[in-house]
Amino acid sequence: MSSAVGKRYARALFEVASERGKIDQVEADLGAIVQAVEGNEDLKKIMQHPHIAADAKGKLVEELFKNHVGEESFNFLNVLIDNGREVQLSDIYSSFVQLANEARGYADAVVTSAKPLSEEEQAELAEKFGQTVKKKLRMTTVVDPSILGGIIIKIGDRLYDGSLKTKLETFAQKA
């Protein structure tokens, strides 16, 4: 869940990216930065350590990201560091993605199934649930054999649970 401060930073960045027509680029840049920080434990510790000076973090960020991300993303990262908000980067990224999806009429959906879904099944689910939420769905699939059968779809804060496991648990509670 994103913090109120994180949402404000995301909104400010979104407005700049929108004005410059760079929503997709900034989203990709932030995703890559978050992935780099979250994927490297040492980098994560440095970025989140409260006693490491902003100047040192700024120099590290310049070495790592300046030539790999757009100007807006790089400058934004420096603003976060200058204001001591780099710890909230992941929350800010999540909020930015939500804003970008809303502007595009998209929603992200996570579909959990007991077995891998075919392309046709994924397209059919995207169509049906897209109509339900009145948005185009970008789907991520997860295979979890423990649900036994059926599917679970999470779109934003909505959860559609049609798994066999849940149906059996409900049946057992009623019996």
Image (cartoon, rainbow, N blue to C red):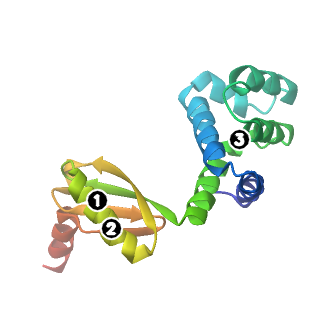
Look at the numbered disc 1 and give the secondary structure of its residue. helix
Query: Residue 84, percent across and down?
Result: 82, 41
Disc 3 from disc 2: Cα separation: 37 Å
Which of 28 and 96 lies nearest the eye of the viewer?
A: 28
Q: Is residue 2 left or right of residue 124?
A: right
- For mark 1, what is the residue? 123
At 68% from the left and 58% from the top, the residue drawn is 3
Q: Amino acid at mark 2?
A: Glu
Quarter of the rendering containing residue 83: top right
Please say if the residues under marks 1 and 3 sit with CB atoms less than 8 Å apart. no
What residue is disc 3 on? 87
Residue on which disc 2 sits:
127
At a point 63% along the width and 61% down the height, the residue shown is 99
The picture quadrant where one finds residue 155 is bottom left
Separation of marks 1 and 3 at Cα, in angstroms:
37 Å
Where residue 30 sits in the image (x, y, percent)?
A: 64, 41
Q: Is residue 21 left or right of residue 102?
A: right
